[in-house]
């Protein structure tokens, strides 16, 4: 695994030693991944090996899914956590691939549940095939991932990933079972993103620690959870501010689906009767227009919802940074700090 940038070089070039970069100096993900680029190449090979199947249908589904697997951010966290004590282990690459398969499986299931037609600018599996095939394909990925864990015989890794899967599934069920979205509180929202996003980031960092830095597992797991929650809040802000060319999905998708996220939850606390009625009317509309959505976005901006959500991102980022304090001063730890800045300032 390549960890090519020395701590001294990092401190000299960035003017820091163990801390986030200054605002406006956000690293590209590729800059973070350069530390583990050899490991990520092996992760890609492991992904293909684990899902390989002779069935033409499954092969076609797998090719599409592997084409939409994204930026491998979560596997990057596995490998960086694994190297934080400068004792990286080869098994981390297989565990990173297993975690990514579980992540892709959740996306496939989410798209089927939400009847989404685009994911990262590509047609979803349910748009190309059917909801039935999508559900079974997601199950297939989960089961191949679990089979690989059984092959490794790593009970602790199995425990980490199944616990995360249970939490994610519980979060999804709680969201689907929620009644009136206008009664969805910030407390509910925090519990949801902790379960649906924070748990998998936490698992990524815990997995890396289990086989490479066990003494730092608690800190790394805390870092992952807070980073994942910040990632989700940023995602929800981008849904209000970015367009399809940037994010690969329509802006306002959550509003199209009448989902309450932090920007609107916070804004409604500051709204008077008239704007609140407008939001209530919007959520009662079966098929809101783009104009309706833009009006709600404008209300969220006007009443401070986006500003509040961005402050919450900074709080979570600070908590992630604090979790890294006391870890060995290695290049991997520096890259984990950079990952915080990347999450906070990302635009897609």
Image (tube, rainbow, N blue to C red):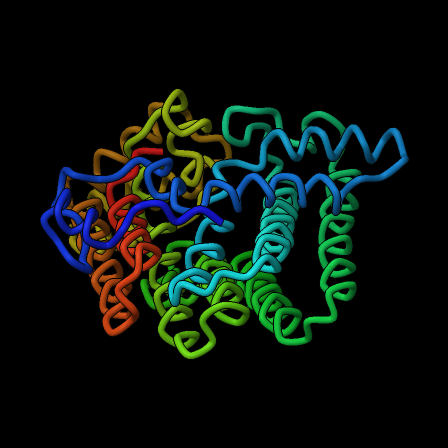
Q: Is residue 312 above or below residue 52?
A: below
Q: Which residue is located at x 16 percent, y 39 percent?
A: 25
6 with respect to 46 (left or right): left
233 with respect to 267 (left or right): right
Q: Which residue is located at x 32 percent, y 29 percent?
A: 242
Q: Residue 37, can we see it?
A: yes
Q: Where does residue 168 sit, x and y in percent of width and height?
A: 56, 62
Q: Which residue is located at x 78 percent, y 63 percent?
A: 151
Q: Where does residue 126 sit, x and y in percent of width and height?
A: 69, 33
Q: Is residue 85 or residue 194 the one in the foreground?
A: 85
Q: Is residue 27 above or below residue 157?
A: above
Q: Where does residue 72 sit, x and y in percent of width and height?
A: 50, 42
- Numbered-mark total: 0
- The furthest residue to the top: 245
Q: Where does residue 9 sit, x and y in percent of width and height?
A: 20, 47
90 with respect to 144 (left or right): left
Q: Which residue is located at x 58 percent, y 71 percent?
A: 160
């Amino acid at each position: 695994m390549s960890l090519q940038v020395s701590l001294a070089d990092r401190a000299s070039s960035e003017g820091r030693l163990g801390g986030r970069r200054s605002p406006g100096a956000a690293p590209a993900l590729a800059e973070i991944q350069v530390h583990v680029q050899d490991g990520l190449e092996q992760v890609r090979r492991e992904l293909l090996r684990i899902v390989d199947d002779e069935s033409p249908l499954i092969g076609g589904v797998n090719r599409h899914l592997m084409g939409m697997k994204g930026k491998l951010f979560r596997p990057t966290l596995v490998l960086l956590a694994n190297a934080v004590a400068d004792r990286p282990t080869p098994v981390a690459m297989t565990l990173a691939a297993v975690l990514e398969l579980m992540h892709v499986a959740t996306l496939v299931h989410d798209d089927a549940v939400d009847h989404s037609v685009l994911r990262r600018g590509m047609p979803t599996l349910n748009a190309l095939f059917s909801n039935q095939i999508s559900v079974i394909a997601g199950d297939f990925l989960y089961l191949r991932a679990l089979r690989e864990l059984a092959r490794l015989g790593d009970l602790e890794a199995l425990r980490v990933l199944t616990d995360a899967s249970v939490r994610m599934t519980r979060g999804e069920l709680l969201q689907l079972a929620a009644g009136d979205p206008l009664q969805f509180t910030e407390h509910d929202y925090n519990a949801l993103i902790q379960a649906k996003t924070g748990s998998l980031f936490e698992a990524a960092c815990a997995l890396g620690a289990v086989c490479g830095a066990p003494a730092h597992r608690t800190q790394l797991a805390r870092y992952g959870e807070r980073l994942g929650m910040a990632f989700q809040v940023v995602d929800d802000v981008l849904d209000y501010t970015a367009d399809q060319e940037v994010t690969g999905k329509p802006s306002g998708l959550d509003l199209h689906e009448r989902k309450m996220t932090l920007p609107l939850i916070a804004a409604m606390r500051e709204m008077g009767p008239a704007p609140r009625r407008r939001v209530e009317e919007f959520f009662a509309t079966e098929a809101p227009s783009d104009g309706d959505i833009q009006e709600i976005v404008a209300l969220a901006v006007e009443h401070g919802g986006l500003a509040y959500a961005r402050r919450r991102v900074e709080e979570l980022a600070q908590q992630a940074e604090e979790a890294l304090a006391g870890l060995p001063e290695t290049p991997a730890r520096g890259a984990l700090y950079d990952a915080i800045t990347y999450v906070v300032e990302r635009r897609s």
